[in-house]
Image (cartoon, rainbow, N blue to C red):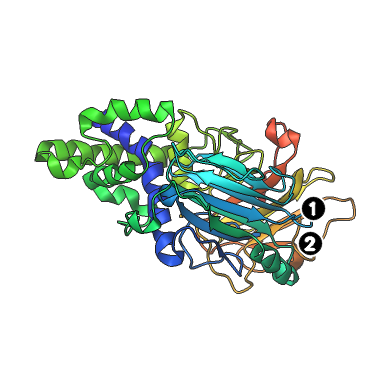
Amino acid sequence: MVTRAAQAYVWGLPLVVSMRTAQTFARLIGVNHLFNERSLSGPGKGLVVAPNVDTLYSIAVLDLRAGPMVLTVPAIHDRYYTYQFLDMYTESFAYVGTRATAGDAGSWVVTPPGWVGKMPAADHVFHAPTPVVFLLGRFLVNGAADLPADRAVMARVQLSALATTNHASASTVVPLGAPRGTPQDVSRAGASFFDELGDDLAINPPGTAADRAALVRFEPLGVGPGRHPASEHNQAQQAVLAQGVTEGAAQVERIASASGTEVDGWDTTDLQLGRYGDNFVLRAVVAQIGWGANIPAEAVYIASQRDRQGNPYSGSDDYVMHFAAGSLPPAKAFWSLTAYAPNGFLVANPTGRYNIGDHTTGLQTNDDGSLDLYLQHNPPTQHRSNWLPTPAGSFRLLMRIYLPGPSVLDGTYRLPAVEKTR
C-alpha cells in the first residue's frame, strides 16, 4: 500500500501545486481578473519557481464555475507574446499569441467542463478540462526602454465574463479558499496531503481518461473528491499515507536531479512537456521545478547543473560558454540564459542583471562571429557586456528558446558545454 500511496502522491502533486498557486494569486489579484505586471521578475517574489526575466507576465485565475470567460486581444504583430491556458493538472490545453494565432485580433471564449450554451458567432472557443484555469501571458521586453510600449500593448487586452443566462451566479460559487502552504513545500504536508488533494479534486475532478483511471487505482487508499483519508483513517493507515508522501517526494526529487539524460552538461529536451498524457512522473517533476512550462512548440527549456567536467556549478568558480559562429540557439522569438539558486529562484546581485540572451543590450560577438558568455559571481575585468552574474553559492542554469527552430525540436541542436576557467 505504501507504493500505491507514493504513486498517488506523484499523480496528485501537480493538482495540489496548481491549486496552491491559484489560491495564492486569487488572494492577491482576485479571480476572473487580468493582472498585468509592470516590471520584470526579480529576486524576492518567490511565488512561482524559475520565473523568466525576459517577459512581462499577464496573469489571471479563471474560476469557470461562475461561467465562461472571454479573452479579447488586439492585433499584436510588433512583438512576441503568448497566452497559455493551463488546467489544474498542468496541461497546456490552449494558446493565443504570436505562434498560435499569428498575433491576430480576436476573442476567445473558455468554457468549463460540460458547459452547453450559445456562443457569439465571431468568437473562438476553448473547452477547459478543469473548472479552475490559470491564464499565463508573456510579453517580450526588448530592454528597459521597451517597457512603456509593452505595458501599453498589455493594457489593451481584456478579460470579461461571457454574457449569458445559463450559468451560475458568481455569488453562488464557493471561494477557492486559502492555500495550506506554498507550492514548493507540498511534501511537508505528510498524510494530510491526501485530505488537501480530496478538496482539490472536489473542485477539479479528472478531465482525461488516463487521470480518471489513475484515480480509480487510488480509491482503496481513500483518495477521491471530497475525501479526507488522513483524518478518517486509523493511525496505521495514516502512517502508510505519510510514508507514501515521503517516498513519492523522494522519487520526484531523485528524477529532477538525475544526470542520465545530459549531453555536455545540458539536459536533453523532453518533447512531452506541457502535454503529459499518462506520464505522471514527468508531470510531477515539472510541477515541482518548473510549474507552468510551455509546450515545446512555444518554448524549450534546457537545464544544466554541471560543467563540462561534470562538477556542480559554484559561485566560487568562473565559467565561459562559447558559441561558435552560426551555432547560436535557433529561435524565431528569442533565447536567453538565466542562473537560479538550487531552489529555482533568483538571487539578488548589485547589477540587477539576471539573464543574458539575444535581446541583451550591448551583447558583443567576437571578430569571427562567435559569442562568449561569461558566467561568474564577481565581475570580469573585461567583457562586462557579456557577463551573467551568478549566485555566490551553488546554482543551476536554464536556457530558454522561444519559438524554437526544427533542429531544437528534433533534438539535433546541441548547446555548447560550460567550461570552468578559474
Q: Residues within 10 Å of mark 1 (few under 14, many from 20)?
A: many
Residue at the farthest left position: 234
Image x and y of residue 136, in percent: 56, 53
Give amino acid for label 1.
Answer: Leu
The residue pinned by badge 1 equals 371
Residue 303 position within the rendered picture, expressed as x and y whole percent measured from the top left: 58, 45
The residue shown at (59%, 61%) is 390
Name the residue furthest right.
Answer: 367
Q: Are marks 2 and 1 in contact (CB under 8 Å)?
A: yes
Instruction: Evaluate whether residue 344 shows in this view.
Output: no
Q: Position of residue 130 (x, y in %)?
A: 43, 41
Point 33% across, 50% down: residue: 186
Q: Quadrant of the N terminus?
A: top left
**Up/down of 45 relative to 163, above or below:** below
Which of pointers 2 and 1 indicates the residue nearer the eye?
2
Which residue shows up at 39% across the image and 64% down it?
Answer: 27
- Tag 1 or tag 2, which sits nearer the N-term? 2
Which quadrant of the figure contains the C terminus? Answer: bottom right
In the shown orientation, is residue 252 left or right of residue 230?
A: right
**Front residue of 422 and 392:** 392
- Which amino acid type is marked by label 2? Leu
* Label 2 sits on residue: 363
Is residue 271 something that shows in the picture? yes
